[in-house]
Image (cartoon, grey):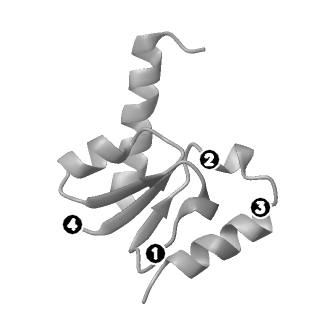
Amino acid sequence: RLPMMAAAVALDHTLDFVGFYLPPRCRVLEVGGSLAPRLERLGHEVARADDLAAVADSGYDAVVLAFFLHRAGDLDSALARVDALLGA
């Protein structure tokens, strides 16, 4: 495990990276991570899930998988699920 300070720095860098690509005040699904509270503070509407299979609704502007893909198993299925969750 990373020491607490290093983990906070890693979260900050991940948030900087993700935030750069998000449009202002968008609807975001964050899967398996700890960015949701930080994204909310930036003005985004955020839903959080521990697993893609647990998400019932769709229509998200963005799906953040920064702390999930390494345990997704079948990457093609995970990305197909993300595609279904995005848009109308």
Label of residue 68 in the image: 2
In the rendered image of this protein, does residue 52 appear above or below residue 36?
A: below
Which of the two discs, 3 and 2, labels the residue nearer the N terminus? 2
Q: Amino acid at mark 1?
A: Asp
Residue 15 is situated, as x and y percent measured from the top left of the image, at 37, 43
Q: Report the residue marked by disc 4.
A: 25
Question: Whole-Å distance between the Cαs marked 2 and 4?
Answer: 23 Å
User: How many neighbours does mark 3 have within 10 angstroms: few (below 14), some (14-19), or many (20 or more)?
Assistant: few
Q: Where is the C terminus found, in terms of image quarters?
A: bottom left
Farthest residue to the right: give it: 74
Q: Report the residue marked by disc 1.
A: 57
Between marks 2 and 1 in the image, the one whose residue lies nearer the viewer: 1
Between marks 4 and 1 in the image, the one whose residue lies nearer the viewer: 1
Please tell me whether mark 4 sits on a helix, a strand or a loop.
Answer: loop
Which of the two discs, 1 and 3, labels the residue nearer the N terminus? 1
Which of the two discs, 4 and 1, labels the residue nearer the N terminus? 4
CB under 8 Å between discs 3 and 2: no
Question: Whole-Å distance between the Cαs marked 3 and 4?
Answer: 28 Å
Q: Report the residue marked by disc 3.
A: 75
Q: Residue at x 49, y 41 (%)?
A: 33
